[in-house]
Image (spheres, rainbow, N blue to C red):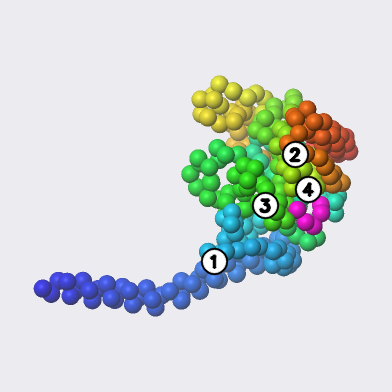
Amino acid sequence: MSRPNETTRALAKIGGFARSAAPFVRGLFGAAEQTLDDWLASRLGEDFNERLARVPLALGPAGVDPFGLDPQWAKYAIASVAFLHRHYFRSDVFGIENVPKGRVLLVANHSGQVPMDGAMIGAALFMDADPPRIMRAMVEKWTQTLPFISLFFARVGQVVGVPENAERLLEQGEALLVFPEGAKGISKTFDQRYKLVDFGLGFMRLAMQTGTPIVPVAVIGGEEQYISVANMTGIAKLLRVPAFPVIPQLLIPGGQLPLPTKYRLYFGEPMVFTGDPDDDDSVIEEKVWLVKATLQSMVNRGVKARKGIFF
């Protein structure tokens, strides 16, 4: 009969200890967060937290937005890419003032084997635009099958690439990034660098349906961060992934990190398209061709203007 009482008393003591320790634990986490915030301010400038406070977020009772974006997750994700943007890739940003303050569809060339190009565009939109914005990006449906990755993408503001999600984001006045080249763009081999592959038509129908301006974004520097010499399509199909690139630098110690190429981001003038979004593909293709040609021209000029890959 005494054993349950002893167990109850022991649990009560543990509970009392936990309650008394809770303020201490919270204090530790608070101190750690403050230390991290101070470090961010020293590396990214005093205005980092001020910029974060200026970003409007429509949060629900659970502290996340309708798509799962969590401000705390987003804060440190943005800080991480901002650090790479400022200090690792040393990005130069041109024409950021061309991005409208309301809803906008950012259409960019895709490259680099991993989506670092999207991260740098997002960093530029937060660190260099006025007002600062948290960019939303559409991710491939297959990423939802990856453990932990699907949750991480949602918490930092990325959304599964289906038309319904895109429409809702634009209706909320968001800046939405799309890569019309899709997986074929990111997995280009080195000999095909900076050559745009075929664009999908969905982004144009979306822009016309929602009356959203398109801003072309040329990314220079991503093609050289991971140099792919081949794409093993057979292995990719076996593993059910979009591509399986052959990247020799991964065999070199330290080569797992992307090469510190210098990024250059060019934001073009807004392009507005009108008409019936349900028109035949042939009609939509003409409009898509204009965006692709504009972006390819921007990419060509950006590559020609740079003096080196790393500076």
Q: Which of marks 4 and 2 is nearer the N terminus?
A: 4
Q: Residue sitting at 46 percent across and 76 percent down?
A: 23
Indicate which disc residue 300 carries: none
In the picture, residue 180 is in which quadrant? top right
Q: In this picture, is 58 found above or below 180?
A: below
| CA distance separating discs 3 and 4 | 13 Å
The residue most toward the top is 234
Q: Position of residue 8 (x, y in %)?
A: 22, 74
Q: Quadrant of the N terminus?
A: bottom left
Q: Is residue 53 left or right of residue 6?
A: right
Indicate which disc residue 61 carries: 1
Q: What's the residue type where badge 2 is placed?
A: Pro
Q: In this view, does 26 lie to the left or right of 278?
A: left
> Tag 4's secondary structure?
loop
Q: Position of residue 310 (x, y in %)?
A: 78, 40
**Residue occupied by mark 2:** 277
Q: What's the residue type where badge 4 is placed?
A: Gly
What's the magenta region? Answer: 99-103
Q: What's the residue type where badge 1 is placed?
A: Pro
Indicate which disc residue 211 carries: 4
Given contact means CB atoms under 8 Å apart, are the residues at marks 2 and 3 in contact?
no
In the picture, residue 72 is in which quadrant? bottom right
**Residue occupied by mark 3:** 169
